[in-house]
Image (spheres, helix red, strand yellow):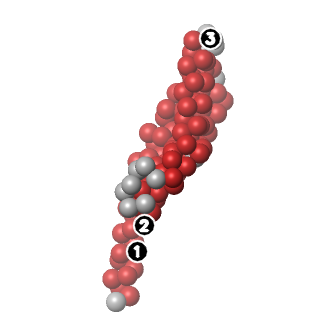
Amino acid sequence: MVLAGLGGIILGMLLTSRVIGWLQAIAGARSATGGDTSSAPMVVVVLLHSGPWLLVATLVGGFLAFTKSDAEGWTWFFSGVVIAPLVLIPAAIVISRRNAKSKQEGSTNAA
């Protein structure tokens, strides 16, 4: 069962990174088009990026796993999928703030 949880954590990390990359791509497309959400780059980013497709596949897989199977391993697996973003997102925020602070201090000391 622990290996199922570990597999879920790995999928959760992959899912988190792809969804965050998708959101960053949307923000980049919005800034490139001047906030116009009806432009072609926005449609391409929303529909062709791997983030939403991986998210939909995980949700459909989770639904099918919980409705069609009574195996206990799926509970462990999808618990890992849920736990990974809860750990990764705050850690990423702390690291990015720490990096921004050290860059700011480095530029202040250089001046």
Q: Can residue 36 be seen at all in this image of the molecule? A: yes
Q: Residue 68 got which mark? A: 3
Residue 95 image point, x, y percent: 44, 59
Cα separation, mark 3 vs mark 2, equals 46 Å
Residue pictured at 58% horizontal, 37% vertical: 53
31 to the left or right of 49: left
In the picture, measured across the screen, residue 95 lies left or right of residue 16, that is left
Residue at mark 1: 103
* Amino acid at dot 2: Asn
Q: Which marked residue is nearer to the observer: mark 3 or mark 1?
A: 3
Q: Amino acid at mark 1?
A: Lys
Near-viewer residue (30 or 9): 30
Task: Between residue 90 and residue 38, name the one nearer to us.
Answer: 38
Give percent across and percent down for residue 8: 60, 32
Name of the residue lying farthest toward the bottom: 111
Give the labeled residue for mark 2. 99
The secondary structure type at the circle numbered 3 is helix
Q: Are marks 1 and 2 in contact (CB under 8 Å)?
A: yes
Residue at 57 percent across and 24 percent down: it is: 60
Give how far across and how far down residue 81 sits, in percent. 54, 33
Quarter in which the C terminus is drawn: bottom left
Q: Is residue 63 above or below residue 37?
A: above
Task: Please state which amino acid type lies under the numbered disc 3.
Answer: Lys
Q: Earlier in the sequence, mark 3 or mark 2?
A: 3
